[in-house]
């Protein structure tokens, strides 16, 4: 399923007073502030709006004092590609940042005109404290990347990098290129000159990262690529990522953490990703790969899918902890209407990094795997996890009619593959709701577990199952056709059968919320709160270290409810 990116190694809280328009009299700014306007002249000093420079060429050729601010006139377009490095920013620090902002009314637009496999509209190379704020960046040529953050020269981390409140669109790997380079934002710990240059304290906040349409060839929103795990302390928050159709053979994601160590990816909306993809090892909404200590929470991910229809390929997952991901957590997310699984644990060893231990808890999945592209609402593949995998308190629902899909059958709730094996000690699947009302070509729903290889070792306890005309539970060579048979098999303790009495099963829809406010996606969807009389109420089993609150932010009692509405 995942032929990962090894071939790609050839590629190698902004203060409100500084937001666009907040400086009512920018002429009063201190020295070290430079202005750029189409009405300026490159022979000017650049030190006031009346003495503005005119071109990006002038901006690139100037040598800046430490802590400088470059202002582009809002509402205006500037053709070219910005490059900031140790030549034109010889002294920099996180405490005295080097900033590129808009001034006046609206956003300034940087329209790229550079070409090539590793071209970028804006490059910040080994510039500590680099901040890009309130800028629109558009692909005016065949430029591969919108913003490139890297460190080509030092073994000491470049630190304090921020991309905020900006609109970056249309970038991706140029047609015909064999490179994997290209995205709205590239975050490289393995720099373009093959230097393993670490980055630290990278913040990507409140941006729009997108293509022009669902089927655009624009590549990932964020593409991280580390050397080992040398990109540290990353925060990706409040971004809206959409219309990234990508190239047919693409292994990235809307948001891709690769080589990151210590990251929070939260309060983002990711949708309409991967329309053009036909390969396996295909695209995902949010993904980590060879990364450590990544927390993915409070995101909404939907319509990661081929357009107009499924023809070939796999993945299109909502959220994926992929090969080599360790000590990571996926919680409080809402995935829906994705062609592949809502949640994927891709348990392979990558770059000598053994997958896990990792946890998925209190997530809601509605009508994922509609194309049966992965085979389950929650997939654990390609092998039994060698470090502990914990899956608890999730609500998994589908009522899709899959009888006319290109691929036969109906999606399982949990799908395990593709070999036999024993899950690591401490692995558990507890307190989850599996509600299957989908229908495959045989007229039956999917199976609650599809475990044909008899993977063992995980503790199964207090999960609730419900569906009509179900496909049962497949465990090794045996299919348990009904709940009585499953109970009698003794493979799970405390299991429950019955309608969980959701407020509005299948009615989750798309949430209405603004990522920069940092409030979502809760309380959406309210569809999966439990009504009085639900057999899920108070019938869960306690899980230690459970985070203390459920999907809806309520304190988890002892015993908990089963599912994401645990209290």
Image: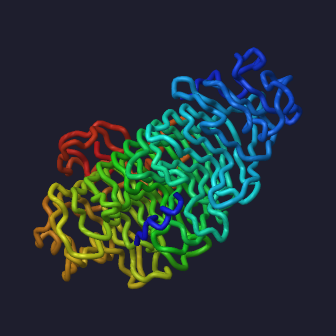
Q: Position of residue 255 (x, y in %)?
A: 50, 52
Q: Is residue 40 left or right of residue 482?
A: right
Q: Nearer the viewer, residue 27 or 254?
A: 27
Q: Is residue 226 left or right of residue 278?
A: left
Quarter of the image for the N terminus: give it.
Answer: bottom left
The residue positioned 37% from the left and 46% from the top of the image is 294
Residue 300 visible within the image: no
Q: Is residue 554 above or below residue 195?
A: above
The residue positioned 32% from the left and 43% from the top of the image is 550
Label tally: 0
The residue positioned 17% from the left and 72% from the top of the image is 486
Q: Nearer the viewer, residue 157 or 154?
A: 154
The image's colour scheme reads rainbow
Q: Position of residue 408 (x, y in %)?
A: 43, 83
Q: Is residue 249 above or below residue 180?
A: below
Quarter of the image for the C terminus: give it.
Answer: top left
Which quadrant would residue 441 be assigned to in this image?
bottom left
Q: Is residue 69 left or right of residue 285?
A: right
Residue 353 visible within the image: yes
Q: Position of residue 48 (x, y in %)?
A: 80, 21
Q: Is residue 228 left or right of residue 47?
A: left
Q: Position of residue 322 (x, y in %)?
A: 38, 60
The residue positioned 56% from the left and 23% from the top of the image is 96
Q: Nearer the viewer, residue 468 or 406?
A: 406
């Amino acid at each position: 399923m995942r032929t990962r990116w090894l071939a790609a190694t050839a590629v190698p809280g902004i203060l409100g007073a500084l937001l666009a328009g907040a400086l009512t009299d920018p002429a009063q700014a201190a020295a070290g502030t430079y202005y750029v306007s189409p009405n300026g002249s490159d022979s000017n000093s650049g030190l006031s709006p009346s003495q503005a420079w005119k071109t990006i060429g002038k901006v690139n050729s100037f040598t800046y004092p430490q802590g400088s601010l470059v202002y582009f006139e809002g509402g205006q377009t500037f053709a070219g590609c910005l490059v900031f490095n140790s030549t034109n920013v010889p002294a920099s620090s996180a405490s005295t940042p080097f900033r590129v902002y808009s001034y006046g009314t609206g956003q300034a637009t940087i329209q790229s005109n550079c070409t090539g496999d590793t071209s970028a509209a804006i490059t910040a190379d080994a510039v500590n404290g680099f901040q890009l704020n309130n800028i629109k960046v558009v692909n005016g040529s065949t430029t591969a990347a919108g913003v490139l953050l890297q460190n080509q020269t030092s073994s000491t981390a470049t630190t304090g990098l921020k991309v905020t409140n900006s609109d970056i669109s249309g970038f991706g790997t140029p047609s015909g290129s064999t490179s994997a380079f290209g995205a709205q934002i590239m975050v490289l710990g393995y720099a373009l000159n093959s230097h393993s240059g670490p980055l630290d304290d990278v913040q990507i906040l409140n941006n729009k990262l997108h293509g022009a349409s669902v089927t655009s060839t624009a590549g990932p929103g964020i593409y991280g690529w580390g050397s080992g795990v040398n990109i540290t302390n990353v925060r990706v928050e409040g971004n809206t990522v959409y219309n990234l159709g990508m190239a047919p053979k693409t292994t990235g994601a809307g948001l891709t953490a690769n080589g990151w160590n210590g990251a929070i990816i939260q309060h983002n909306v990711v949708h309409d990703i991967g329309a053009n993809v036909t390969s396996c090892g295909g695209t995902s909404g949010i993904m980590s790969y060879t990364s450590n200590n990544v927390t993915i929470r409070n995101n909404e991910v939907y319509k990661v899918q081929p357009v107009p229809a499924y023809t070939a390929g796999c993945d299109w997952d909502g959220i994926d902890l992929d090969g080599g991901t360790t000590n990571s957590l996926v919680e409080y997310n809402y995935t829906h209407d994705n062609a592949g699984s809502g949640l994927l644990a891709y348990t392979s060893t990558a770059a000598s990094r053994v997958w896990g231990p990792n946890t998925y808890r209190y997530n809601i999945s509605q009508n994922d795997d509609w194309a049966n592209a992965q085979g389950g609402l929650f997939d654990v593949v390609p092998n039994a996890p060698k470090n502990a995998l914990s899956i608890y308190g999730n609500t998994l629902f589908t009522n899709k009619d899959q009888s006319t899909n290109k691929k036969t059958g109906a999606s399982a709730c949990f799908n395990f593959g593709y070999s036999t094996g024993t899950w690591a000690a401490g692995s558990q699947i507890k307190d989850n709701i599996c509600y299957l009302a989908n229908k495959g070509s045989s007229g039956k729903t999917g199976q609650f577990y599809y475990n044909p290889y008899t993977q063992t070792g995980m503790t199964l306890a207090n999960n609730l199952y419900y569906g009509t005309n179900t496909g049962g539970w497949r465990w090794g060579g045996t299919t348990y056709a009904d709940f009585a048979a499953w109970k009698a098999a003794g493979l799970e303790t405390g299991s429950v059968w019955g309608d969980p009495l959701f407020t509005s099963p299948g009615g989750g829809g798309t949430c209405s919320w603004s990522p920069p406010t940092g409030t979502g996606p809760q309380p959406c969807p309210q569809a999966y709160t439990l009504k009085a009389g639900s057999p899920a109420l108070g019938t869960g089993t306690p899980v230690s270290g459970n985070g203390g609150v459920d999907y809806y932010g309520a304190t988890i009692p002892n015993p908990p409810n089963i599912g994401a509405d645990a209290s």
